[in-house]
């Protein structure tokens, strides 16, 4: 990140001081996670901060990001990786912990993404609610995916309504319903624009959007966005985005999907050029039908707090490290980074 990536909205001033911001963060997190757990039937569990590289459990994200690694002296300098996300671990945990169909788990996930390009809404520190739920094979459909998205979106709207009662300066801006569109439909609608521009235009027009089918190539030969081949089914996934007027951007709050079965796993590993991953323990378990069918995703904690508190920079609601020039620009602009 350089200071040119850091947008300071004209006339912006936080409505809350640092102490009030901390109270607001806790208020949002307590309310939203309780509602999420109740509506999706989720139980909070403990989760790992690091995993063994050979397990195949770490999230490869777009396939180019490097995990933070370290060695463990007590274990003959065995290597471990800080997680990028818990996308694959959760599915394994549902079986290990003895969850049943229509039951799920959620966890507070902390991750380090050392190669992240930071700006107002991106940080090298990632904190999110990672959740996963067991479903029946017959529920691996676009309609069931949409139904789950609507459930999460209702929890977001309820949280905004609650915050608007608690804080006079917060108005309700989320529309009543979320709009669904596929990446191909979006490309057809805006063929001359980049994926990020398409997201902005559709989100600005609709207010809240779920962009579906992310990971595979579009008719243009380009991908809308990268997605690891071994957890989401690229035909049954999507991102939840909302229009954020403070920064005049499309703000992604959640990425989620119905997870791969054997067929989707093998096809996507082949398309991604990494069929050798099928030999890893997690991947073999999916291919051999040893893990349950699931749906799951991640919901950004700092992103949600930033959105509901109407903050201009994610550093106002989470502790991270920022370049010196960004710290200076923030201080000069009256923006207090934690």
Image (cartoon, rainbow, N blue to C red):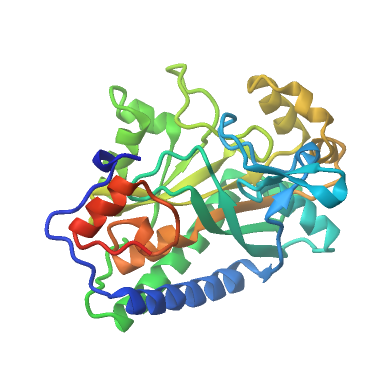
| Quarter of the image where one finds residue 41 | bottom right
Residue 107 or 231: which is nearer the viewer? 107
Residue 22 x/y as whole percent: 40, 75
Side of 77 where 59 appears, left or right: left
Q: Residue at x 52, y 51 (%)?
A: 146
| Quarter of the image where one finds residue 15 | bottom left
Residue 302 or 269: which is nearer the viewer? 302
Residue 9 or 154: which is nearer the viewer? 9
Q: Quadrant of the N terminus?
A: top left
Give the number of marks: 0
Residue 151 x/y as whole percent: 52, 63
**Residue that protrudes farthest toward the bottom in the picture:** 166
Relative to residue 155, is residue 72 depicted above or below?
A: above
| Quarter of the image where one finds residue 148 | bottom right
Q: Residue at x 48, y 47 (%)?
A: 124
Residue 166 x/y as whole percent: 32, 83
Side of 166 where 213 appears, left or right: right
Side of 292 where 321 appears, left or right: left
**Residue that protrudes farthest toward the top in the picture:** 221
Q: Quadrant of the C terminus?
A: bottom left
Residue 311 x/y as whole percent: 29, 62
Residue 37 or 5: which is nearer the viewer? 5
């Amino acid at each position: 990140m350089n200071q040119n990536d850091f947008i300071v909205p004209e006339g912006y001033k936080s409505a809350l001081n640092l102490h009030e911001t901390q109270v607001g963060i806790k208020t949002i997190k307590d309310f939203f996670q309780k509602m999420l757990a109740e509506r999706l039937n989720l139980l909070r569990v403990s989760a790992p901060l690091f995993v063994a590289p050979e397990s195949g459990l770490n999230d490869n994200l777009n396939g180019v990001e490097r995990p933070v690694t370290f060695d463990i002296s007590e274990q003959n300098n065995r290597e471990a990786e800080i997680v990028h996300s818990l996308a694959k671990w959760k599915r394994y945990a549902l079986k290990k912990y003895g969850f049943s169909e229509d039951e799920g788990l959620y966890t507070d996930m902390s991750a380090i993404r050392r190669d992240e390009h930071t700006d107002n809404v991106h940080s090298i520190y990632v904190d999110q609610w990672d959740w996963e739920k067991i479903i029946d094979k017959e529920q691996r459909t676009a309609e069931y995916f949409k139904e789950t998205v609507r459930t999460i979106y209702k929890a977001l709207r309820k949280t905004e309504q609650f915050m608007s009662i608690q804080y006079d300066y917060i108005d309700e801006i989320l529309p009543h319903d979320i709009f669904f569109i596929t990446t191909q439909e979006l490309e057809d609608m805006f063929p001359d624009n980049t994926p990020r521009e398409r997201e902005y235009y559709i989100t600005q027009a609709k207010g809240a959007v779920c962009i579906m089918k992310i990971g595979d190539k579009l008719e243009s030969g380009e991908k809308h966005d990268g997605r690891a081949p071994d957890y989401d089914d690229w035909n049954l996934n999507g991102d939840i985005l909302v229009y954020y007027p403070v920064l005049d951007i499309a703000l992604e709050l959640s990425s989620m999907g119905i997870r791969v079965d054997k067929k989707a796993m093998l096809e996507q590993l082949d398309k991604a050029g990494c069929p050798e991953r099928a030999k890893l323990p997690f991947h073999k378990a999916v291919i051999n039908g040893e893990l349950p069918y699931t749906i799951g995703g991640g919901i950004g904690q700092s992103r949600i707090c930033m959105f509901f508190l109407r903050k201009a920079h994610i550093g106002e609601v989470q502790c991270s490290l920022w370049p010196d020039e960004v710290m200076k620009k923030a201080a000069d602009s009256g923006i207090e980074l934690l």
